[in-house]
């Protein structure tokens, strides 16, 4: 099938009198696609990306949460920030063992251990506080999507 560069997004199925609501979600989906936050699929279904819609529903709020949660990374170089963020997300989404994190990141387990020590120095007790961990994970996922675009 030829690609004419036309993008389409599907909003939620709604009753005919609620088509404006479906159109609004389809437009928001297209905007996230244009920004590079969503993958370019044809067509893009809004409900395949509900978490992303939630994360990007308010850019000011998302940016404030990222800035606040990830403040300990602020003094690092961009490369060091990227590595720390990648390691921290792997830590938060796994059991936290160095060999498991190393496997996800494609690094040696000792490298993962070194990075985990750095994260412990930077974030301290936040790494063990469920509310802080939740905020960190949300921020890291939003950052990853934002930087991919």
Image: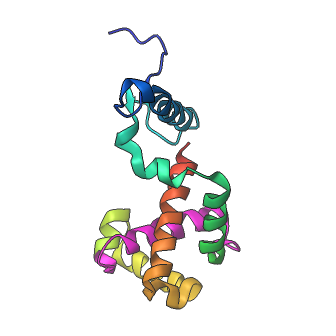
Q: Position of residue 25 (x, y in %)?
A: 48, 35
> Is 55 situated above or below 18?
below
Front residue of this view, candidates 104 and 62: 62
Q: Is residue 120 left or right of residue 102?
A: right
- Tell me which secondary structure the magenta stretch mostly adopts: helix
Front residue of this view, candidates 110 and 67: 67
Q: Position of residue 139 (x, y in %)?
A: 54, 64
Residue drawn at 59 percent across, 73 percent down = 69
On whether residue 74 falls in the magenta region, the answer is yes
> Is 70 situated above or below 6?
below
Residue placed furthest toward the right: 75
Task: State the quadrant of the N terminus.
Answer: top left
Magenta region: 73-99
Q: Position of residue 85 (x, y in %)?
A: 52, 67
* Count of residue discs: 0
Residue drawn at 58 percent across, 37 percent down = 35
Q: Is residue 28 left or right of residue 43?
A: right
């Amino acid at each position: 099938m030829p690609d004419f560069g036309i993008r389409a997004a599907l909003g939620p199925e709604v009753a005919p009198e609620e088509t404006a609501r479906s159109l609004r979600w389809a437009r928001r989906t297209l905007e996230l696609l244009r920004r590079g936050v969503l993958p370019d699929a044809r067509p893009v279904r809004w409900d395949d990306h509900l978490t992303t819609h939630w994360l990007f529903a308010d850019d000011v709020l998302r940016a404030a949460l990222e800035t606040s949660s990830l403040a300990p990374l602020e003094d690092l170089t961009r490369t060091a920030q990227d590595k720390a963020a990648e390691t921290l997300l792997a830590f938060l989404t796994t059991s936290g063992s160095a060999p498991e994190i190393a496997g996800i990141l494609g690094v040696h387990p000792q490298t993962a251990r070194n990075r985990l020590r750095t994260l412990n120095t930077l974030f301290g007790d936040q790494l063990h506080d469920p509310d802080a961990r939740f905020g960190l994970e949300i921020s890291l996922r939003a950052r990853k999507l934002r930087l991919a675009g």
